[in-house]
Image: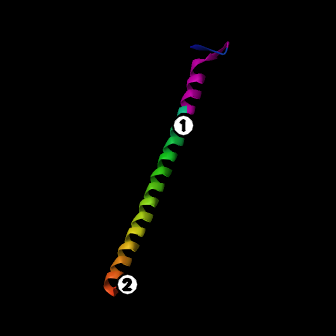
Amino acid sequence: MLHRDNGHLRPYGLVMSKVLCTQSVIHTYLLEAEQKDCTRKKETAKKNEASKMSSVIASACKKRFKIH
């Protein structure tokens, strides 16, 4: 089967394989971006958790030792 592409006749399969290749590259890129975003969110959550813990510990120390 032939497919007309920019005025040149090309095998249809070649064009489709290029399209599929491009789609898979984009899909891989999106997956990587999603994983990075997820990792960043986890890191942010860890930092927030650490700051919460440190503030809880600090307030507990203040109460215990009556530091104002």
* 38 is higher (above) or lower (below) than 43: above
The reply to whether the magenta stretch includes residue 66 is no
The residue indicated by pointer 1 is 26
Q: Residue at x 40, y 74 (%)?
A: 54
Q: Measuring from the top left, give residue 48's x and y in whole percent.
A: 42, 64
State which quarter of the image contains the N terminus: top right
The reply to whether the magenta stretch includes residue 9 is yes
Judging depth in this view, the residue of 26 and 53 nearest the camera is 53
What amino acid is labelled 2 in the image? Ile
Q: Residue at x 48, y 50 (%)?
A: 37
Q: Is residue 7 left or right of residue 62?
A: right
What amino acid is labelled 1 in the image? Ile
Q: From the viewer's perspective, is the residue at label 1 or at label 2 nearer?
A: 2
The residue indicated by pointer 2 is 67
Magenta part of the chain: 7-22
Q: Residue at x 54, y 30 (%)?
A: 20
* 35 is higher (above) or lower (below) than 67: above
Prevailing secondary structure of the magenta residues: helix
Q: Quadrant of residue 67?
A: bottom left
